[in-house]
Amino acid sequence: MATSGGRALSGPAVAPRFFSGVVTQAAPAAAALLGVADVALARYHQPQARPGWVRDPVVTCNGDRLRFESFSACGGVYARLDLLNGALDGEVFDRGTTNVDVNAPLREALARIGARDPLHLGVGLDELVVTTMDGAVVEKKVPLPERWLRGFAEVQVIASGMDQRGELTGMAAVRFLRGLPKKGTVWVAQAGRELKVSHRQVPGSVQLAGPNRLGTLLPLLRFAKSLRVYGPADAASSAWELELPGMRYTLTLSPERWRGFSGEGAVLDDLATDEAENDADVVGMLLNFEPEVEIGLLADRAGMPADRVRAALTQLGVAGRVGYDLSEAAHFHRELPYDKDNVILLNPRLAKARKLVDAGAVRLEGELATVHTSGGARRVSLTDGSCTCEWWWDHRGSRGPCKHVLAARIVARAAVEVSR
């Protein structure tokens, strides 16, 4: 697999080389790699072909595993394949992150892999070229769209709020996935040893909008050992994880077919804290491409509370530097060469909120606030995060706070700090 520019432990690299060896479970690995590549090609909402939507999957070597990640062109489906230590037999040359080109010849080769065929996997090129920290060529070599970068940040925050809601093993998982409807919205809940599909929300259920978005799981069913379902308390987004021999394949779905993760707004509260940027610099220096980032250990090493470490990880996630593994219930480190200044640029609601604060447009009144804008005064409740603006009435907090709520919270936090 030819790699583009990225970052390794040894530094920025034009073409990093991470791994060379045998994949001991060739057939499921080949099929799952094609699944990740197929998601990058797919547009589940208004699916028509359009040039320029094809993107190369991101690959991270964490030492004991390889992670392949992609987003659909519509931004509503996130796919990840974790090739674990038990499926890899070879040499790790370095740890880090880059993009891999799953081109037509590679797709054809993967599609021909049979149950008993060997599969040698090389991630990188024969020559490793390291550039300096100032080398602009590294950034130009990573063709990640802005929507992917915002999606990486949103998914890790949303996933970190999910819990396992159900599990099926063996043929039960196969029957369930093959029996799902192709369209519409359903809810899925554990019922004994089965997963029950309902057309209305029930306690403990997970929402599944657009079941056809799970399509890349179907070619993997012949290898599946189990299916795990994850969801948050509000049953909006969902994650579907197939356990395969020595690997895991996970699809995380947005709440609706037409909704991309890039606009969900789950990161905004953490990014609005005054300490987040400085804390991110400290925490980022402590990351070392670990397969599991332990928040407690990071908090001890950084000398800061766990909630500030989580906010710092959100800030780092906006730069594509951390993800979240549901099976491990832990963050993991990846590294994409994007500047931290992009945090504001990629989150226009936060940028507008800070402009309101700088303009002195916020007036606090206990647990209420008035935010003066060109469109009139907006009343904000700091208790429940509600607002009188059109955004809140349209979404009721389901897509993160509006700019007025963000501005009020920034001013309220500053007032608490001053009172101390």
Image (cartoon, rainbow, N blue to C red):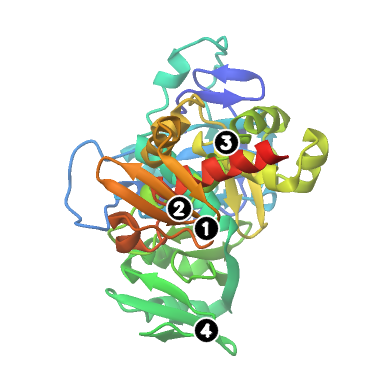
- Nearer the observer: mark 2 or 3; the answer is 3
Residue 367 quadrant: bottom right
Mark 2: which amino acid?
A: Ala
Q: Which residue is mark 4?
A: 203
Q: Which residue is mark 2?
A: 79
Horizontal side, residue 132 vs residue 155: left or right: right
Mark 4: which amino acid?
A: Pro
CB under 8 Å between discs 3 and 4: no
Q: Which comes before the other along the chain, label 1 or label 4?
A: 4
- Residue 74 on image: x %, y %: 29, 50
Report the Cα–Cα distance between label 4 and label 2. Answer: 27 Å
- The local crowd at label 2, few if under 14, some if 14 to 19, many if 20 or more residues have their Cα within 10 Å, is many
- Residue 226 on image: x %, y %: 58, 72
Q: Is residue 393 visible?
A: yes
CB under 8 Å between discs 1 and 2: yes
- Nearer the observer: mark 3 or 1; the answer is 3
- The local crowd at label 1, few if under 14, some if 14 to 19, many if 20 or more residues have their Cα within 10 Å, is many
- Residue 113 on image: x %, y %: 45, 52
Vertical relation: 216 (above or below) 121: below
